[in-house]
Image (spheres, helix red, strand yellow):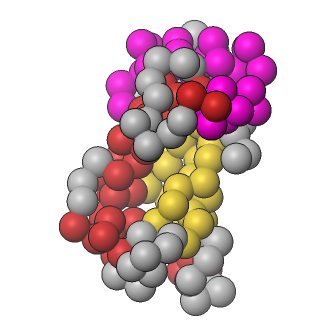
Amino acid sequence: MALRLHMRRGRVALRRVVLQRMQGGLGTIADRAVALSFHEADSLLQAWALTAPVRTSHEVKVEVLWADGFVFEGKFPLMHRAAKRSGLIQNWARNTLALIGGLWKPTSMSAREYAETRAQYGPKEQEISAQALEEYEL
């Protein structure tokens, strides 16, 4: 999983969410969108989800940027069922940061898988991930 984190002290306001559909799109500019709120990003993902697979997922590259320069990047697994869900980006970011920061383990993940997943990130990324949950509203 690719993840890039940069943390600077400052305001916590969201600047933008950039979405890039990597699979299942039209192969045009319509596969990239910039949202100015989590709600707007969810609306875009919900529309894209209508053409996503039911049992597997399409990959969407997501970049969340806050006003103070904090950046969260990753790959969101878009499935058809997301068309009717809300809080998609916020829940995904919160859960991913909590996982990396050692604050949450999915029940579906074994202890070995959890340790292997966390080991993909260095101590600094783990610390920043845990801090981000406290300092940034998601």
Inspect the magenta stretch and tell me whether residue 136 lies in it. yes
Residue 91 falls left or right of residue 84: right
Q: How many marks?
A: 0
Query: Residue visible at 34% across and 58% down?
Result: 42
Inspect the magenta stretch and tell me whether residue 81 lies in it. no
**Above or below, 88 relative to 7:** below
Classified by dominant secondary structure, the portion drawn in magenta counts as helix
Residue 52 seen in render: no
Whole-percent x and y of residue 49? 38, 74
Query: Residue visible at 66% across and 27% down?
Result: 115
Query: Residue visible at 63% across and 85% down?
Result: 28
Whole-percent x and y of residue 74? 62, 47
Residue 66 falls left or right of residue 2: left
**Above or below, 14 relative to 125:** below
Residue 17 seen in render: yes
Q: Nearer the viewer, residue 114 or 19?
A: 114
**Above or below, 134 relative to 79:** above
Whole-percent x and y of residue 138? 36, 31
Q: Which residues are magenta?
A: 113-138
Q: Nearer the viewer, residue 132 or 69?
A: 132
Q: Nearer the viewer, residue 97 or 73?
A: 97
Q: For residue 13, which quarter of the picture?
A: top left
Residue 42 falls left or right of residue 135: left
Query: Residue visible at 51% across and 39% down?
Result: 109
